[in-house]
Image: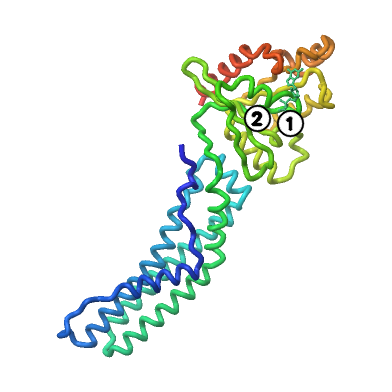
Amino acid sequence: MRQPFESMPTVLTSEELIDKAYRENDRSELEMSDYVPPIVKAKKREAARIKVIEDVTAGYLEGLVKSVPTIENIHPFYSDLLEILVGTARTKAALGRISRTARIIREAGKATAAKLKRTRNPAAAGLLRRSYFGRVASLVRSAEADLNAIAEMREKMRDLPTADPAVPTVVLAGYPGVGKSTLVRALSSAKPEIRTYPFTTKEIIIGHITRGYMTFQIVDTPGILDKPISKRGKVELLSISAFGRLSNVIAFIVDASERNDFSLESQKALYDDVAASFKGVPLLVFFNKCDLATPEQLKRAEELFGPGDRLSALKSEGLADFVGKLEAALKEAFSAS
Ligand code: GDP
């Protein structure tokens, strides 16, 4: 699957667009017979030049606006990222102004062509064309900031990795060090994929799991679902939301051995936080590091979280049951949607 911003073409600066219009204009010389009267020749030549300038500039701006995916139609994962990385309102406003500029260039082109028809001498025809060129150049220059904004948006959005919402996805949550990446590596049928995203310096690890006819992915998102939501800034919140939109099921991993300075109680607080932030997304809990956890810790974990499956990612114990639970939850989530 392709991602929606991938096919956006390079964005010209306003000076580049003006140069392009002049170049095309120089190339468009009309062949006319010597018998055509000078005023007719002049009118035809200037009308053709006006049309070239209009089509090159307005046509480019219209094409640019069309090349931007309709924000309402893209997967929320990408619209969240657009909001985080660029700003949706800013992008829409820039696109609106660029469309308006294209419309004004077209209308002024038509008005100039109409005036040209009424002209009676060649010099006046040349003057009309030059004044139209001047108007178009200043209109294009006034779109400079908006063109730059779209160019910047393209830079940020086009290299985002593809996210295929059709692939059933389990996102792992839990404090750092609880064993999430060990789990992904232990479960993935092939080498896990590593992806980078612009809003976190950490790599996202994606494992692919095939069970019978079903293939799903299991995603470890360091820095995303591993600290309390209340301690997050806006960008972090939106990236959490973007990932929430990709996940069909969240598997919350508890370090039952409390090895990583996170008590079971603090892990429960993070669990509650994740549950409150992703209402509607099934949330399963698993107790990892059961090879190290004491019976007392396991009992306390169940008192806090309720019953959860026990596993040891390191020793590959309980993994088949873990995958079975995820598969069942995904099937349920998909049949419900
Ligand atoms: P993450 O930050 O949640 O991705 O945690 P990691 O997967 O990097 O694991 C942190 C540490 O815990 C590593 O040293 C792992 O080898 C270790 N670890 C993970 N799972 C287990 C387990 O089930 N038992 C034991 N003993 N160690 C584990």
Horizontal relation, residue 263 to residue 50: left or right: right
- The amino acid on which the numbered mark 2 sits, given as a three-letter code, is Asp
Q: Secondary structure at mark 2?
A: strand
Q: Secondary structure at mark 1?
A: helix
Displayed quadrant of residue 190: top right
Which residue is painted at 41% across and 78% down in the image? 133
Whether residue 197 is visible to the viewer of this picture, yes or no, is yes
Displayed quadrant of residue 22: bottom left
- Tell me which colouring the rendered structure shows: rainbow
Q: Check the image and report above or below for 161 versus 265.
A: below
Residue wearing tag 2: 220
x and y percent of residue 107 in the render? Answer: 38, 71
Q: Earlier in the sequence, mark 1 or mark 2?
A: 2
Please state which of residues 200 and 40 is positioned toward the viewer in this rendering: 200
- The amino acid on which the numbered mark 1 sits, given as a three-letter code, is Asp
Q: Are marks 1 and 2 in contact (CB under 8 Å)?
A: no
Please state which of residues 203 and 149 is positioned toward the viewer in this rendering: 203
Which residue is painted at 61% across and 15% down in the image? 325
Whether residue 280 is visible to the viewer of this picture, yes or no, is no
The image's mark for residue 273 is 1
Which residue is painted at 75% across and 34% down in the image? 227
